Image: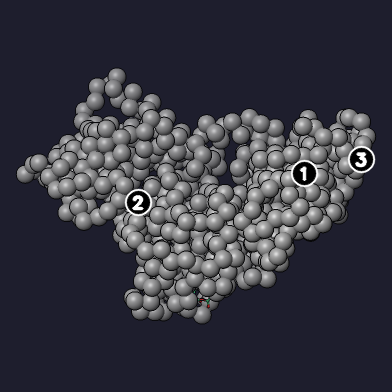
Amino acid sequence: MDSRVSELFGGCCRPVGGGGTLRGRGGAGAGGGSKGKKKSGRNRGGKANNPPYLPPEAEDGNIEYKLKLVNPSQYRFEHLVTQMKWRLQEGRGEAVYQIGVEDNGLLVGLSEEEMRASLKTLRRMAEKVGADITILREREVDYDSDVPRKITEVLVRKVPDNQQFLDLRVAVLGNVDSGKSTLLGVLTQGELDNGRGRARLNLFRHLHEIQSGRTSSISFEILGFNSKGEVVNYSDSRTAEEICESSSKMITFIDLAGHHKYLKTTIFGLTSYCPDFAMLVVSANTGIAGTTREHLGLAMALKVPFFIVVSKVDLCSKTTVERTVKQLERILKQPGCNKLPLLVNSDDDAVTAAQQFAQSPNITPIFTLSSVSGENLDLLKVFLNILPPLTNSKEQEELMQQLTEFQVDEIYTVPEVGTVVGGTLSSGICREGESLVVGPTDDGKFLQLKVCSIQRNRSACRVLRAGQAATLALGPFDRSLLRKGMVMVSPEMNPTICSVFEAEIVLLFHATTFRKGFQVTVHVGNVRQTAIVEKIHGKDKLRTGEKAVVRFRFIKHPEYLKIGAKLLFREGVTKGIGHVTDLQAIITEENGLEETLGPGRLTF
Ligand SMILES: Nc1nc2c(ncn2[C@@H]2O[C@H](COP(=O)(O)OP(=O)(O)OP(=O)(O)O)[C@@H](O)[C@H]2O)c(=O)[nH]1
Ligand SMILES: [Mg+2]
């Protein structure tokens, strides 16, 4: 992590001039057609009458180029179907086909007749693998020919089977009152806001339904898309269960608090719920204010790819909106951020944004919209519909092969159900009725328990797979033995726990100097505890921007940590980031070895 990210946390904004903002480069049509020629961007086609190109087709990933698919032989058809299965696997159930494009990226284009026949074949292929197709965009290419030729970009999405929809988590960040909850209310309920919190109220009522559920400071909202790419939300479904049943893809938004006094909870939301992406909401009329910069810094520090929504454009003039966008572009281009802003103004831009964003974490799409007038809301939906997962099926399979590990983020007592924990399955598979161990307790033990039932998105689920968030009912298990930050793992795992660990850190901001004896709140995944700085290797103090390997000791109880885990710490204005490099393992009778409670033996 670049230490210059500290500018976002504590330093001031340093404007830099120059270009670099991408304004809708178009995907299939980039550089093709009159619109494309005016645009700038990495994948641009080039001068007029020169053949426009996309980057050459990648072997892996979920994007396939096909020049044409006219009347394939049976043998070729079977081959095409196998290939589609592979592309869908790469995109965890989603693939994008560019028709009329050669493997080297040359945008050749097809006549209307050829395109019609090719799409017919594509539809047959999709049917064969149990998928639906949706046309994302069509473009004309006009170089070197009088006859108009077309490129068509098609989304292929598998119809869900057995709750196996694609599930993406998006953490929602931004200053207090920037319109986060309102935007989520509008997206998930399907009704516009009145500017006085009506959409937000809808959401609160919805929260009320799950009274025994999540805390009021972190809430979850779901937005589904069906295999045809249409929105599935509460406007036509009554329950979360119905939404899940009709969706092929589910976006779970993690609504976080904007106010500074809830920063700890907001950090917890970002570190423990493992969001795939973050959405930073900035109010057009206030611009970068309050906690915006800090939230941006958090997403950067935790390497969560983020996009930006400039909200409330109905409240101000075009000039004010432009000023806010410029302000954001400046901060994004600063050396500490090094991002390439991409302003989304059309459906075409939204498709490009989703594809480019997934390919390069440096691209930062910016939307300008209103939750009251609904302006540009559709562009955000187009983007969310196409936004691909960052891991492919193979990586997902590998995670599922590992031993079961569930992070405990929330604990509740539900009448007639008993103790319930909420959190994420970070590896393996968890089934109803499974026996696991939970810990570490204050004295470093792991306790046996049984998973009585599992719920995802408030509907029953028999099998939980790695990467999925859920609530698990533990029956009569004593709630007072549990705390946030614990893990529930397979009994055969024998997890390493520690009170003392080392981390390579960079101090992002500190008012004076950071030295031995200093106490900070450490966040590592779902672990949040005060730790004391025991040693700074090779130095006796650290200043802002400096790096070092530091030894920390948790002050209350041991924790389950992993080498390589991202770490974030803060105390007042002091902030730092890094990763865990070593653990001083505590070895107890319970994990099958000798008893050396307290500072134990080094395992490295
Ligand atoms: N005119 C207008 N008002 C909006 C828009 N979006 C939100 N608001 C209003 O702004 C106010 C604050 O919105 P919230 O959604 O509660 O803001 P928030 O970002 O969730 O705030 P915290 O949860 O406190 O961090 C509400 O009164 C909304 O009605 C918009 O696009 N246009
Ligand atoms: Mg809110």
Mark 2 against mark 3, which lies toward the viewer?
Answer: 3
- Residue drawn at x 48%, y 76% is 286
Q: Which residue is mark 3?
A: 597
Residue type beneath disc 2? Val
Considering only order in the chain, which callout, 1 or 2, is on the residue closer to the N terminus?
Answer: 2
Q: Which residue is mark 2?
A: 351
| Above or below, comparing residue 188 to residue 275 in the picture | below
Q: Is residue 449 left or right of residue 121?
A: right
In the picture, which quadrant includes the C terminus? top right
Mark 1 against mark 3, which lies toward the viewer?
Answer: 1
Q: Position of residue 1 (x, y in %)?
A: 57, 49
Give the structural element (helix, strand or loop) at label 2: helix
Q: Which residue is mark 1?
A: 501
Calculate the distance from the C-alpha at mark 2 to the C-alpha at mark 3.
56 Å
Mark 2 against mark 1, which lies toward the viewer?
Answer: 1
Residue type beneath disc 1? Phe
Badge number at residue 146:
none
Considering only order in the chain, which callout, 3 or 2, is on the residue closer to the N terminus?
Answer: 2
Q: Is residue 305 left or right of residue 475?
A: left
Tell which of 453 and 171 is nearer to you. 171
Considering only order in the chain, which callout, 3 or 1, is on the residue closer to the N terminus?
Answer: 1
| Above or below, comparing residue 473 to residue 101 in the picture | below
Instruction: Indicate the quadrant where residue 15 lies.
Output: bottom left
Residue 453 seen by the camera: no
Whether the residue carrying mark 1 lies under 8 Å from ligand 1 is answered with: no
Tell which of 426 and 224 is nearer to you. 426
